[in-house]
Amino acid sequence: MATAEREITVAVHCGVHGRVAADLARIARQSGTRVAIRVGDTDIECSSILEILSLGLSRGCRIRILVKGRAPEQVLDQVCALLTGEES
Amino acid sequence: MREQCLKQHVTPGEPRTLFGIGASPGIVVATAKVFRRQTSSAAWRRLAAERIEPEVARFMAAVGKAEQELKLLRGRIAENLGDALSIIDSHLLILKDRMLLDRTVEIIRGQGINAEWALAKALGRIKKKFVALDDDYIRQRYQDVKYVADRLFGALSGRAEDLLASEGELTIVVGHDFSPEDILAMQGRGVLGFVTEKGGITSHAAIVTRSLGLPAIVGVKDATHICGTGDQVILDGFSGRLHVNPTPDQLKQYHEYDRQHRCYTRELAAYARLVSETRDGYRVRLSGNIEMVGESESVLEYGGEGIGLFRSEFDFFAGRKLPDEQTLARSYGRLLERFSPQTVTIRTLDVGGDKFTTRLPGNPFQLDLERNPALGLRSIRYSLQEKSLFTMQLRALLRASVKGRLRILLPMISSLSEVRAVKQLVAEAREEFEREHIDYGSDFELGIMIEVPSAVVLADVLAREVDFFSIGTNDLIQYSLAIDRANQYVAHMYEPLHPAVLRMIRQTVDAAHDQGIEVSMCGEMAGDVVCAPVLLGLGLDELSMRASAIPHVRRMLRMSRYRQLVALADQVLACREAAEVRNYLTSYLPVHYEVDMIGP
């Protein structure tokens, strides 16, 4: 199983709140890959919007995104774009 | 909401009148349906082994039902209500989230307890995680989890269907507070009106009911305790009165008001097409307030002479990204074209205060954390901080101004330096256009809102610098009387006819006319038929109001003589307190205008 990971700084204004968390959960569910966020030594699964929200990721947080599955790079790019506020 | 429907009377059957704030006009008589906040909990039971799987099935059925409800609601909301849709979408995700769903099932199976108890336990764990968060905004998202859980509790108890099952039965819904979602879900299901204990005239409940055209009263203290399900009630959205168990006389009277109101509405349609002038030929401009370009048709339909206030915020909040200059210029241009040769007044971004705080895409300021937002970084102050955003809007306005007669209105001006700072930005924008060879208009007008007391005091100074004034009464009253009208404890002290307010209006008009510039008024007061004669007598050149009020004010104007309006204003200015003003008007108006003009 291919994996890809990247460390990023959360740049969305107001942090990872309702809509961003919902979009992230949706990407994780629909991509067919396993998307996780690592903060410190905690890993959470992004298919759960509540786990994402309960991390309380504010703007400026350093996190690591891990994607496992087919074509992980593509999903990783999508997730990073969302959390750095670069998505369209 | 998901509140329990209870029947509780303080004194059953006794007529009572409760007072609140008329948030959405209209009178309706129907049976009350009272929703009280859920305080009691379902029975918590331990389950025998053979009851465990059926309990899991019952829980899953409740999840299915809640999902169906949300999807049904989602389907009924117009696609253009982007915010409402994305709220419901995230609620659907929460509903199926494993921290809620899988965890509850685990607890039912592992601990052998009923679904309600298990759900409460799962919820408790989620709450613990959220409460520990540093980020205020994300912490508040727990409210969404709570909302979904309440829906599930409702589905489990079967009570959630109360609302939907009431189809066909005409009711007035009374509750502590309703979210926009609740109101959207209930409308069209036999609900004739809404009453809430919480909230002011700018609350979500007030705004949504007004846009749906359903009468509503907000800020009615203890309504859910005094009024019981099944009580007959009269909801008077004009005066903010709620009559519980009305006497036969009251009922007769209100049915008559209702009848008159309906006849009167038909008669008013004729006024949409008449000129705005008094019997002796004194003319003023009656124009419309709008928030979205789409509302301009209703302004034209009601005979509005231009737009006196276009609140430009929605373009900035509608999407997930800020609009670009091109898009804004096109949208403003269309509006100007539609109304040309009449004027269109576009107010620049008015964020902060009690509205539009956290949601502005790319907003770096923590406006929602301000201790006192009404006195904080709002409106023009925000725009002058966020210069690139503000300049973008100014450029869009300048480009659009070739399409018609544009008035640019700056909100919340409290000193001359702000006006000069904006003028500097406008000058810079023009230079850039010249360099870039971009077409832009140069015969627009630049004016300011008079809504801060310091601007009234300095009106003579400011009048020399700008092309027009527009008095924003909502904020002017709030700032001068120090009343937050969304605050249920002091809302009743919010008084447009306070002598101090009337004197400030007079002072502003005089200062403007001395410099030969126009004064408009765009607050709610302008569309109030009781206040309008006084305002016209005070010399306002334009009254801008919600479209449906235009024919009412025009009818009043056409029944007046200019000299009589001036005399009225002088009389009223001599009053020492608001009650005196109101007393004077209630004896004066029926004599000079037909009684029914004032409404019930």
Image (cartoon, coloured by chain):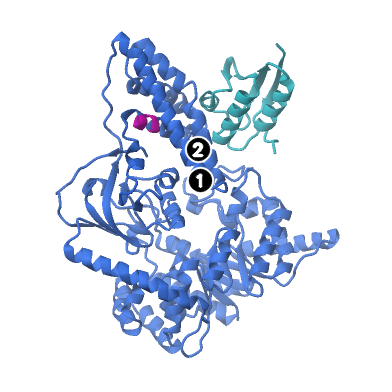
Chain colours: A cyan, B blue
Q: Which residue is mark 1?
A: B77
Say if B200 sits above or below B500 in the image: above
Residue B329 locus on image (x, y percent): 71, 59
Nearer to us in this view, B438 or B486: B438
Q: Secondary structure at mark 2?
A: helix
Do discs 2 and 1 share a chain?
A: yes
* Magenta residues, start to end: B151-155
Q: In the rendered image, is residue B531 in sight?
A: no
Say if B206 sits above or below B88 in the image: below
Say if B595 sits above or below B435 in the image: below
Residue at 57% x, 35% y: name it. Answer: A19
Find residue A7 and report its image quarter. top right
> Marks 1 and 2: in contact by CB < 8 Å?
yes
- Of the two numbered discs 2 and 1 in the rendering, the one whose residue sits closer to the viewer: 1
Residue B97 locus on image (x, y percent): 50, 24
Residue neighbourhood size for the residue with mark 2, other residues' Cα within 10 Å, grouped as few (<14), some (14–19), many (≥20):
some
Q: Quadrant of the C terminus of chain B?
A: bottom left
- The label on residue B88 is 2
CA distance separating discs 2 and 1: 10 Å
B175 in the magenta segment:
no
Direction from residue A6 to residue B7 in the image, left or right: left
Chain letter behind tag 2: B
Q: Secondary structure at mark 1?
A: loop
Q: In the rendered image, is residue B532 in sight?
A: yes
Residue at 60% x, 81% y: name it. Answer: B516
Residue furthest out toward the bottom: B280
Chain letter behind tag 1: B
Direction from residue B536 to residue A68 in the image, left or right: right
Residue B199 locus on image (x, y percent): 38, 50
> What amino acid type is highlighted by mark number 1?
Ile
> What amino acid type is highlighted by mark number 2?
Ile
